Image (spheres, rainbow, N blue to C red):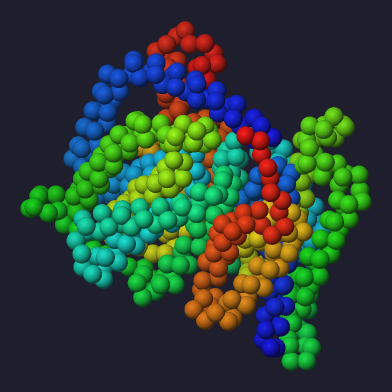
């Protein structure tokens, strides 16, 4: 059933999607720039308005945003399921923790190393995963997510077993008058801006179109001369690298890693983030990150179990009413507001 | 040799549990092309309901039947209410919905029953059964027996009843079945109900071994995935054989391969899934699906 209706739906979606995007791009350009400038200004000045724990929470939002962007490249843009990105997040975090703790390497380098390692691991995992379509890939990655905490505990010599590794928060360099939290925030913000810029650049051009083309119709893409297997495994690698860098940053920011924080629920959290934020959107990563950071916090007041119940309900409800997430909803709203004469089926 | 046989038998016992859950997965997959990621959590929740009934003082077998019945109705309702609106949506959508169910069941169970482990009684005598030098747990043997019994009932249902035939037809060719007057959509719901009932049995059989807690099914579900993958997602017999194979392999590898022990058991399942998917993605008994481009 699904295979019969699938392609038709997709084609419609692409047509209206591109038409809408093209029209929106014309009107949205100046306003988009203004919004971007405001967001940047707010995020740069944030440490002057808040401090301590609250600022740490926003650091965590940025970290999640990077991870979500990585996952969204793979699942949203390229159409490959991953229910196991928590694994790459964990690999990144442990790379950093082990390098700092055991080898005393500067944390800046460890972030790069985590990115490169995850790029390689992701590429290697993506290679065999090429042969797995849809559901099977979901299964394989889901099993990866289930198995990771155990693997981390097993290599006790490196990972410190279930005790994990305790790190210390880095001080601001170059004699800057910043607290540790402020410095961490700016470091994360810098990395996030860099990675978002790179992703935007990658996805808007030829490569981005190829990635989306593979998602929408891989046979047609192949016929157009796109090397499906190369693109798919490279996207897997890049996506893992983003998530790994996020993991590395989280290890530095939290100053602690333990195997059980990288369980299957982390992977589901990340998936929730891109569902809520919006598939195949860059801005969605930020909405999703805000959601997965703050909603559980509020829900925790109700009960220890409540955050997950709320995640679950949001996952299902979003699939029914807002399948393209907050970003898709805002986009739609924007189009409704700016172009009053949109025919019904295009506005959808 | 004694150790070997003993490990094989206890492997078959856990394998039987994996087989029930794998069978549940396969049933839903066959009927709807969906893998239900919440299968394990639904089973866990049913087991908690059974625990509540036992606490209320109901006898074991009454509880057993009541739980299976409740799980059946529950599964049916979940299909009607939650899954049906996205029936024709892309696979990713349905996967996400079942993941949503997974976290909801997990957290609601934690909310109601707390995360503290609870002992769950076994209906079989605690006294082990001795044959020569080999000791069998009575629960292990009982679990194998129940699994086999359920399998036979299921086989009979699908093979000899009109309803079973209708369900198979609905899964195989929905359009023609509808033309024959079969209510295809309801057959899918029935499939969900049966799968949930199976899960409940698996949950009640495994709870005495691993203790009852909201996360008890995590590892078991992974093994059920492995079992379904090994046997092939399109083959119920395959799921059963796959389950037994996975159970025995898990035990033997744990016993004889020293660096794996009990600590890397989940990784063994992961490796099995990935190897099977790479070498023979349809599994041992699955049929290759040929699709028109």
Left or right: residue B257 versus residue B227 is left
Q: Is residue B7 above or below residue B20?
A: below
The mark total stands at 0
Q: Quadrant of the C terminus of chain B?
A: top right
* In this view, A199 is above or below A157: above
Q: Residue at x 81, y 66 (%)?
A: B148
- Residue that extends furthest to the bottom in the rendered view of this protein: B133
Picture layout, residue A193 above or below residue B262:
above
**Is residue B73 visible in this depiction of the protein?**
yes
Q: Position of residue B277 (x, y in %)?
A: 59, 56
Q: Is residue A37 left or right of residue A200?
A: left
User: In which quadrant of the rendered view does residue B280 lie?
Assistant: bottom right
x, y (%) of residue B242? 69, 63
Name the quadrant containing residue A116. bottom left
Query: Residue at 64% of width from left, 30% of height from top?
Result: A5
Q: Quadrant of the N terminus of chain B?
A: bottom right
Q: Nearer the viewer, residue A217 or B209?
A: A217
């Amino acid at each position: 059933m699904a295979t019969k209706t699938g392609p038709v739906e997709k084609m419609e979606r692409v047509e209206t999607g591109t038409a809408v995007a093209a029209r929106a791009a014309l009107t949205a350009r100046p306003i988009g720039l203004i919004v971007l400038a405001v967001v940047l200004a707010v995020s740069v000045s944030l440490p002057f308005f808040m401090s301590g724990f609250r600022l740490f929470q926003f650091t965590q939002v940025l970290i999640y945003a990077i991870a979500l962007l990585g996952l969204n490249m793979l699942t949203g843009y390229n159409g490959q399921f991953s229910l196991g990105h928590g694994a790459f997040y964990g690999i990144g975090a442990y790379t950093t923790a082990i390098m700092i703790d055991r080898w005393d390497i500067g944390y800046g380098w460890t972030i790069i190393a985590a990115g490169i390692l995850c790029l390689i691991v992701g590429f290697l995992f993506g290679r065999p995963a090429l042969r797995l379509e849809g559901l099977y890939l979901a299964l394989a990655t889901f099993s990866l997510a289930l198995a990771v905490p155990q693997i981390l505990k097993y290599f006790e010599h490196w990972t410190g077993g279930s005790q994990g590794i305790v790190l210390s928060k880095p001080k601001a360099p170059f004699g800057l008058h910043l607290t540790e939290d402020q410095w961490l925030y700016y470091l994360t913000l810098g990395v996030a801006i860099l990675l978002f810029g790179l992703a935007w650049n990658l996805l808007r051009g030829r490569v981005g179109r190829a990635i989306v083309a593979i998602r929408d119709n891989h046979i047609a893409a192949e016929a157009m001369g796109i090397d499906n297997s190369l693109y798919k495994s490279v996207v897997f690698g890049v996506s893992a690298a983003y998530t790994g860098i996020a993991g590395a940053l989280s290890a530095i920011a939290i100053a602690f890693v333990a195997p059980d924080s990288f369980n299957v629920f982390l992977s589901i959290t990340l998936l929730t983030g891109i569902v809520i934020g919006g598939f195949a959107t860059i801005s969605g990563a930020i909405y999703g990150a805000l959601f997965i950071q703050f909603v559980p916090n509020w829900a925790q007041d109700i009960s220890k179990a409540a955050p997950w119940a709320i995640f679950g309900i949001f996952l299902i409800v979003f699939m029914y009413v807002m399948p393209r997430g907050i970003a898709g909803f805002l986009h739609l709203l924007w189009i409704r507001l700016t172009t009053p004469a949109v025919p019904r089926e295009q506005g959808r | 040799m004694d150790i070997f046989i003993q490990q094989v038998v206890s492997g078959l016992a856990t394998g039987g549990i994996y087989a029930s859950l794998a069978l549940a997965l396969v049933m839903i997959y066959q009927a709807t092309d969906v893998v239900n990621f919440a299968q394990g959590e639904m089973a866990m929740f049913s087991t908690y309901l059974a625990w509540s009934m036992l606490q209320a003082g109901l006898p074991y077998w009454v509880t057993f039947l009541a739980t299976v019945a409740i799980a059946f109705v529950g599964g049916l309702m979940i299909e009607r209410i939650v899954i049906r609106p996205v029936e024709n949506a892309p696979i990713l959508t349905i996967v996400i919905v079942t993941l949503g169910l997974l976290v909801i069941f997990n957290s609601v169970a934690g909310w109601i029953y707390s995360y503290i482990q609870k002992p769950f009684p076994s209906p079989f005598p605690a006294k082990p059964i001795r044959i020569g030098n080999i000791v069998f747990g009575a629960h292990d043997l009982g679990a194998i027996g129940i699994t086999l019994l359920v399998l036979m009932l299921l086989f009979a249902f699908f093979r000899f009843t009109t309803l079973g035939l209708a369900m198979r037809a609905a899964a195989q060719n929905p359009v023609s079945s509808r033309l024959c007057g079969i209510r295809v959509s309801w057959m899918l719901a029935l499939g969900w109900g049966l799968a949930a009932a199976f899960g409940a049995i698996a949950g009640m059989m495994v709870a005495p071994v691993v203790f009852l807690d909201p996360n008890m099914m995590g590892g078991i579900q992974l093994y059920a995935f492995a079992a379904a993958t090994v046997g092939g997602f399109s083959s119920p017999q395959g799921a059963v054989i796959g389950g037994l194979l996975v159970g025995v392999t898990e035990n033997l590898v744990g016993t004889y391969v020293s660096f794996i022990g009990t600590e890397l058991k989940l990784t063994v399942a992961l490796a099995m899934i990935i190897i099977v998917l790479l070498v023979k993605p349809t599994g041992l008994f699955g049929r290759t699906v040929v699709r028109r481009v």
